Amino acid sequence: MAVLLLSGLMTGATAGSAFAGPVRTRIVSLNLCTDELLLELADPSHILGLSPLATDCAESVRCEIAETYPVQRPDGENLVVTHPDVVLDGTWHRPTVPLVTNALHVPFVQLPSIASLADIPTQIRTVAHAIGEDTRGDNMIRAFADRLESLHPTHPDQILTATVIGANLAGEEGGLISDLLKRAGFRLSASERPDGTIALETLIAHPPDLLVTGMISEGASLAEDVVHHPALRDRFTGAHFLALPGRLTMCGTPDTLDALTALIAAHDRLTGTEPSP
């Protein structure tokens, strides 16, 4: 069956080049995260189609660029029409997709979700190798590593507390947001709930140093409605509040470092090393 799960594909930034495959010229992406990496790595003329979320600026960091490409439904039926030479998707997909790629003998590359910034080079390498653009992938990985190396709070020894609420910001230990907070000089506030959330009353009575909200679009979910509660607005002001665009943490791409940059700036403001905006 032509299904490739390449999450463990090599570890060195230059390792992929030694095993470079053919450059794919008819590429279809059915997942937002593969959309974003594909737009950075592939020749524009080689992209046959992107997922519907690619053009949603609330969720996609490459929405403006994506508007110039065809968008197709993420199902197997469309693949019969376009007949790509490689299909990129996440690990959650419609059952018809692997059935069609298998019947057409087309490589089907699935990109798993990430748990930390350390997973992003693997994500880049997976997509780059799948489309035959290993050199571009290596260059992107080096640029990502260089930028990550330069990002750190002014006073990393001052560990502050933070709580995250809102869409796409799961506050559990071990996830992407937890890794971002740790690198920025924060630790997650303890939760008394099994799902990792914190009651509104607890936030008000025992406030963390920083409240981080992840907004996708106003009113899109109950999680986002909480962000607009008057009690939170009154309690967390100035340097104690940070609104992160949800699209920065939707996927693991070099743009995720923009979220880290914002968190570091928040830490520096709270420790008195950067003026409040």
Image (cartoon, rainbow, N blue to C red):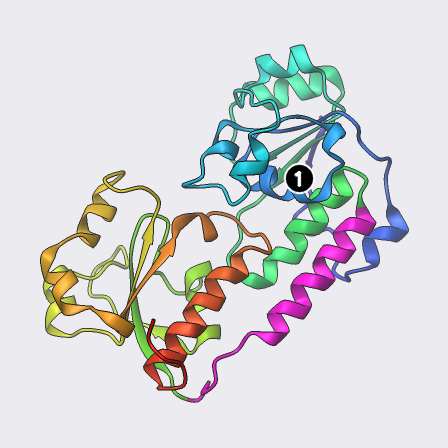
Q: Is residue 136 magenta?
A: yes
Task: Give coordinates of residue 201: x percent, y percent.
Answer: 9, 64
Task: Give coordinates of residue 116: x percent, y percent.
Answer: 52, 61
Q: Nearer the viewer, residue 97 or 215?
A: 215
Prevailing secondary structure of the magenta residues: helix
**Is residue 26 shown left or right of residue 216?**
right
Residue located at (90% from left, 52% from top): 18
Per the image, label 1 sits on a secondary structure element best described as helix
Residue located at (52% from left, 38% from top): 63
The magenta segment is 134-157
Asked whether the viewer can see residue 179, the reply is no
Residue located at (60% from left, 28% from top): 68
**Is residue 119 shown left or right of residue 231?**
right
Task: Give coordinates of residue 49: x percent, y percent.
Answer: 63, 25
Residue that mark 1 sits on: 38
Residue located at (27% from left, 38% from top): 220
| Residue 71 versus residue 201 in the image, above or below | above
Q: Nearer the viewer, residue 268 or 251?
A: 268
On the image, which quarter does residue 129 sit in?
A: top right
| Residue 37 versus residue 202 in the image, above or below | above
